Amino acid sequence: MRKWKIPEVTISRLSLYLRCLSELEEEGVEVISSAELGKKCGINPAQIRKDLAYFGEFGTRGVGYYVKDLKEDLKRIMGLDREWEVALVGVGNLGRALLSYQGFKRHGFKISVAFDKVIDEERKKAVPEGCELYHASMMEEVIRKKKIKIAIVAVHFSEAQRVVDALVKSGIKGILNFAPVRLSVPKGVVVRHIDLGIELEVLTFFVNTKMY
Amino acid sequence: MRKWKIPEVTISRLSLYLRCLSELEEEGVEVISSAELGKKCGINPAQIRKDLAYFGEFGTRGVGYYVKDLKEDLKRIMGLDREWEVALVGVGNLGRALLSYQGFKRHGFKISVAFDKVIDEERKKAVPEGCELYHASMMEEVIRKKKIKIAIVAVHFSEAQRVVDALVKSGIKGILNFAPVRLSVPKGVVVRHIDLGIELEVLTFFVNTKMY
DNA sequence: TAACTTTTGTGTACACTTTCACAAAAATAG
DNA sequence: CTATTTTTGTGAAAGTGTACACAAAAGTTA
C-alpha cells in the first residue's frame, strides 16, 4: 500500500497501539490478533489492519501479529527507535510541571534545554539534571547548535506567535503548543495544540445539555 | 435546524469562535461577517455558518453577525453563562500546575476542590484561596454534596480507572483526563483525553519522515 | 495431501465532514 | 419603489475516514 497522505488520526492510533503492545509484552503475550488488540485499546479491528496497511504487511494470516516484532516495526515507523531531544520554552507553572513529568523518558523524549525570559532561583531549581536553562535570547543559537527539532511552547498566549516564529527560524520542525492561540507556521512544520480552555468548554456543553 | 447529534468538532470550534469574538469585542469591532471571522480563526466561512446553523439563525443577511450578540448566544449555548465548579483529582506536579493556571478563571471555571491520597505541607501550600484540599477518601462525599459535575483527572495511569469509577458514582458528568489510558465510562458521561505522549509521538512521526 | 480453521489484507459500501454554490433576505442607493 | 449589493442559510457535491465482508494465505488436523 504505502501511499502517502496518511491521516493524523492514523498516526495517533499507531501511538496507541504501541502503548498497548508494550503492555502486552510486559504481560508476556507473544502473539495477538487484531480482534484482541482492538478490544484492548477500544478500536475496531478492521481499523487497526487498515492503519497498519499504510506501511506494509506486518501480520501472519491465521496467526495474528507477533507482539515484539510489531512493536519494533511501529517504533521504527514512528521514528521512536532513538531518543529525541526536546526544547521547552517557558518555565512558568506549566513549564515546571512538564520538566518534572517522568513520562517523557519512557517515551524516549528528553527535555534537554529550557528557555525563559526570566532566569531566577525558582526556575533554576525546577530544571533537572541533564537539562540546561538559558535566557530566551539564546534560543536560536542553542537550538541550532544542538540540532533540536521538537519544541514545547508553554508561554503566555501574547508571546506564543513570536516564540514560534523564532523556533521555526532555528530549525524546529514540530511544535507542541499549550498557548490558547492558533499559530501560523510555514509548510513543513507541524503543530499540535493542547488547549485546556477548549477542552473544558466542550465538556461543559455536553454536561450542560440534558440530551446526548 | 436544531437537529440533535452535533459533532464534537463543531462544539470545539464554537469554543474557538467564542474566543475570537471576545478578542474582536475588545478591539471594538461591532459587526463581523463569516468571511472575516473565518480568516481570523482559520476556519472556512461556510463551516462557521454550518456550525452555527445547528443552533439557530444568528446573523443578518447582507450585514453579518453582531459580535456582542453572537458572543452572548454562544456562551448561552455552551452553558458558559455561569461559573462552573471543577474538582481536581491528583495534586502532583501536573495537578499543582493546573491549580496555579490563571486561564480557568477567564473561562468561567473554578477548581473549588482538590483531592489526593497524600496530604502534606507541599500540597497544602499549592492549593490557592477558594479551593479546598481533601483526602481522596472524601471524594464521593464532597463532590456529591457540592453537586460538582466536571472533574480533572491528573493521577498516575495505574489509578485512573479506579478514580474515574468513583467520580462517576459521585455524579460527575464530564472528565478531562491527563492519564495515558483509555477510560471506560457509562453512557451519559463525557471524557476528553489530553495525552502528552501521543501528541509528542505524532509530532515525531511527521518530523522524522522527510515527506509531509 | 486434502479438508478445515483462523486471521490477515483489502475492495466496497457506508457515514460523517467539509466545501461549494446559489437562492433568499436584508440593507443601501438611485 | 426598483435595482444593486452584500452576506446569510442551506441543498447538494466532494472529500475523508470508518466498518463490513470476504478472498487469500498460513497453520492445523486427519
Image: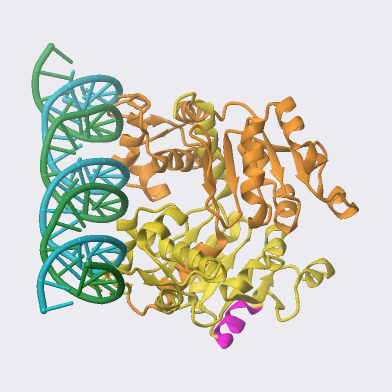
Chain colours: A orange, B yellow, C green, D cyan
Q: Is residue A202 magenta?
A: no
Prevailing secondary structure of the magenta residues: helix
Residue furthest to the right in view is A121
Q: Is residue D23 above or below residue B135?
A: above
* A97 relative position to B3: left or right: right
Q: Which image quarter: residue A146? A: top right
Q: From the viewer's perspective, is residue A63 above or below residue B167?
A: above
Q: Which residues are magenta?
A: B138-146
Tell me which residue sits at (75%, 75%) in the image.
B128
Reply above or below: B2 against B155. below
Between A133 and B169, which is closer to the camera in this rendering? A133
In the rendered structure, the answer to whether residue B193 lies left or right of residue B157 reads left
Residue B18, percent across and down?
A: 47, 68
Q: Is residue B22 something one can see in this rendering?
A: yes
**Quarter of the view holding residue B154:** bottom right
x and y, in percent, of residue B137 in the image: 65, 76
Quadrant of the image occupied by residue A63? top left
Q: Horizontal placement of B172 versus B127: left or right?
A: left
Q: Point out residue B185 in the picture as x, y percentages from the top left corner.
A: 43, 65
The number of numbered discs placed on residues in the rendered structure image is 0
Q: Residue furthest toward the bottom?
A: B145
The reply to whether residue A84 is visible in this rendering is: no
